[in-house]
Amino acid sequence: METSWRASRPRPVRNPQRSPTPLSSHLIPLLLRSPRGGDRTFAAKAGDDLPRRTRLHSVVVCGARGPRPRYPRVWKTDKRIGTVAKSQKLVTCIKGLSNVKEEVYGALDSFVAWELEFPLIAVKKALNTLEDEKEWKRIIQVIKWMFNKGQGKTMGSYYTLLNALIEDGRIEEAEELFAKIFSRYMEGLPRTFFMKIISMHYSLGSYQKMFEVFADMEELGVRPDRSIVRMLGKVFRKLEMLDKYEKLHQKYPPPKFEYRYIKGKRIRIRVYPDDDSTEEATKSDSEPDTDELEVVESTNLDN
């Protein structure tokens, strides 16, 4: 009986070392997708051998599980100094120095020598610490050094410098600084600068300069605060300028309500007017005049 060529062909012997390994059940439907792009899958059970025509060259089995090991970079340091620690280091660095300008500026230059960028935030926090401790001379030195570096020229820095100059008793320098800021930022100058300089002139008794600053405020359209109006009213009454005092209170009447923050909440509170005028009126009514006293004494003597 003749046998066909296919029947007489010997079957290839499989290598036992390269036998297919069983795959998990959730990978088999993905591997048995149709090569034409359809969604058909062959029904197969976990542990069954796959057909010969199925190719597994695209399957990559990763032996190592979990995240890859990360090694520290060479150019990164483990210890990082924050802005708070830098500000404290700056405060301790300049506190024990004398008031010589070159010594203080040299210490500040050595502090920022190895910085890639100017530590503006650390310097601002150091200024806040010095302001809490009322170190006005150190504040003036640090701000002037920062301005010489061309850094931190903001309204907050200017106001801190103005306040430090006033507290340290440098009235002429404070007036020069205010004139410089006023000429540069005329229409954009905040109201706090006017309040500070008017309160300085009020405490020194220089009422003419106080009136000049208030006239500049009115020309620029800056509405004065209640404290400024109160100080001006006291000066007008002291100098017996009652007509200007009445005009001032007609233009800027006292508010009936004001807002205060109590435990983080904005609360509206009724404000009662000052009773200075009523107190003066009651005193004048209760105390008799000297002429009346003389008349009463003369009548008693005659009797």
Image (cartoon, rainbow, N blue to C red):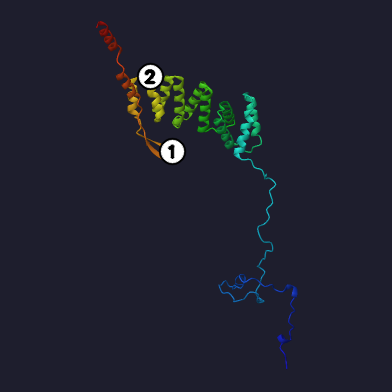
Q: Is residue 265 above or below residue 153?
A: below
Label for residue 50? none
Residue at point 64% right, 31% down? 93
Q: Quadrant of the N terminus?
A: bottom right
Q: Amino acid at mark 1?
A: Tyr
Q: Nearer the viewer, residue 68 or 283?
A: 283
Q: How many marks?
A: 2
Closer to the camera, 78 or 62?
Answer: 78
Apparent side of residue 4 relative to residue 259 in the rendered image (left or right): right
Say whether residue 220 is visible.
no
Q: Percent from the top left, x then y, of residue 137? A: 57, 25
Amino acid tagged 2: Lys
Q: Is residue 146 left or right of residue 213?
A: right
The residue to which callout 2 is attached is 238
Q: Identify which residue is drawn at 50% across, 30% down.
A: 159
> Please, what secondary structure does the residue beneath circle 1 have?
strand
The residue labelled by disc 1 is 261
Q: Specify whether residue 231 is in view.
A: yes
Q: Position of residue 73 (x, y in %)?
A: 68, 48
Query: How far separated are the C-alphas under marks 2 and 1?
Result: 34 Å
Q: Check disc 2 and report its element: helix, strand or loop.
A: helix
